Image (tube, rainbow, N blue to C red):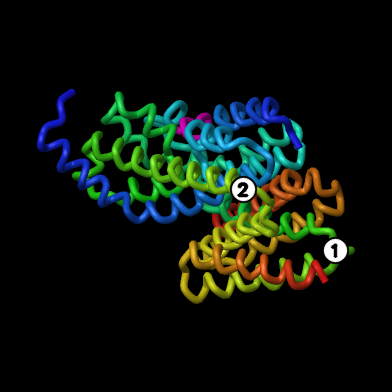
Amino acid sequence: MLSVAEALIAAAAMMLIIVFCRALPFLFFAGRKPPAFLSFVEVYMPAIAMTVLAVSSYTSIDWAAPAVGAASAVAGTAVVALHLWKRNALLSILGGTILYMLLNSLLVRV
Amino acid sequence: MTISDGKSSSAIHAFKASIPVLLGYVTIGFGFGLLAVNSGYPWWFALLMSVFVYAGAAQYIGIGLFAAGASLAEIALVTLIVNLRHAAYGLSLIKTFGKHPRARPYLVFALTDETYALLSSASEEDRADGGFLLMVSGFNQLYWVLGTAIGALAGALIPYKIEGLNFALTAMFIVLAVEQALKLRKALPFLVAGLSTIAAKFLVGDRGTIIVGLLMATIILVAGDRKGVSDAERR
């Protein structure tokens, strides 16, 4: 775990990078045609980034203790099902997390 | 600047326009505050991040990386990759923001996914009003900071660690991925990204999974896209 001081430095770096990302088109492309790569990023990057982040939270599970993995898999499936059904982000996240917490306390502690 | 009738009515108008974001930001902000304190950071640190970093997904990922003791380079690269999409948002707002040079610095700073969604779908008339743009952006950040404050307070008051809360982060990524799938209506990017992540895990282990997975998926898809474009041109 990073200390608070280290985390403050890291957070400051994050701030600079995020401001840079948000300011990028205003700095470089005002009045010019943006490169094709950026329109690719606009279309596909959110999908790639979210999939990688979601899958990586599963690959980092210690599958030697299958109960945690099972709880994550069931709760994750529930999130997808809830979201396809109601398409309400809050409901999907809250429902999946509560289910995970329940399964976690039932399966892992036994 | 005095607050004229015109200004106060436009404040109400901007508030109404920001309502769709209110509930989402207060609750996701709440989750962030709670997560930050649960991960061992003080309440004021969570608040500082929501005021100065102000980027939903990146803040959640950031706390996860801080708690895992990630290196500065790793944190920087992940932040860059996760937020590059914001560069794409600005492209469609160059003209709109260009008309309001004094408001522009804050408008650019506060250009989150949700604010972009509101501003880019606002009427022509509203987009011509710098005060409206500024107030909608400001209201949104207010909700985010407010949610963070309440969550951090709750985290500080509850003495024990809440088991399993960090699944909210996984759930959020799944929801955002499903949203993207419903929008793109293509399986390939998700398949490539998912398999790249699993491959990255076995190639470099947990510490580098996200970066290597992102790079691998992007390179494969960009290469595939180039080929698709040149195939289409040949036809």
Q: Chain of mark 2?
A: B
Question: Which image quarter holds the N terminus of chain A?
Answer: top right
- Of A50 and A57, nearer the camera is A57
Mark seen at residue A63: 1
- Of B200 and A13, nearer the camera is A13
Is residue B155 in sight in this rendering? yes
Does the magenta run of residues contain A16? no
Residue B23 x/y as whole percent = 40, 55
- Residue A52: quarter of image: bottom right
In the depicted structure, whether residue A67 falls above or below residue B70: below
Q: Chain of mark 1?
A: A
Q: Which residues are magenta?
A: A18-25
> Residue shown at 80%/67% (left/top)?
A109
Mark seen at residue A36: none
Direction from residue B212 to residue A77 in the image, left or right: left
Q: Residue furthest left?
A: B5
Considering the whole magenta stretch, tell me its main secondary structure.
Answer: helix
> Residue shown at 64%/62% (left/top)?
B190
Q: Residues within 10 Å of mark 2 (few under 14, many from 20)?
A: many
- According to the picture, the residue beneath numbered tag 2 turns out to be B35
How many labels, in total? 2
Q: Amino acid at mark 2?
A: Leu
> Residue shown at 61%/73% (left/top)?
A78
Q: Secondary structure at mark 2?
A: helix
Q: Residue furthest right?
A: A64
Q: Amino acid at mark 1?
A: Trp
Residue B66 x/y as whole percent = 70, 38
Mark 1–mark 2 distance (CA, rounded to whole Å): 24 Å
Direction from residue B125 to residue B152 in the image, left or right: right
- Residue B165: quarter of image: bottom right
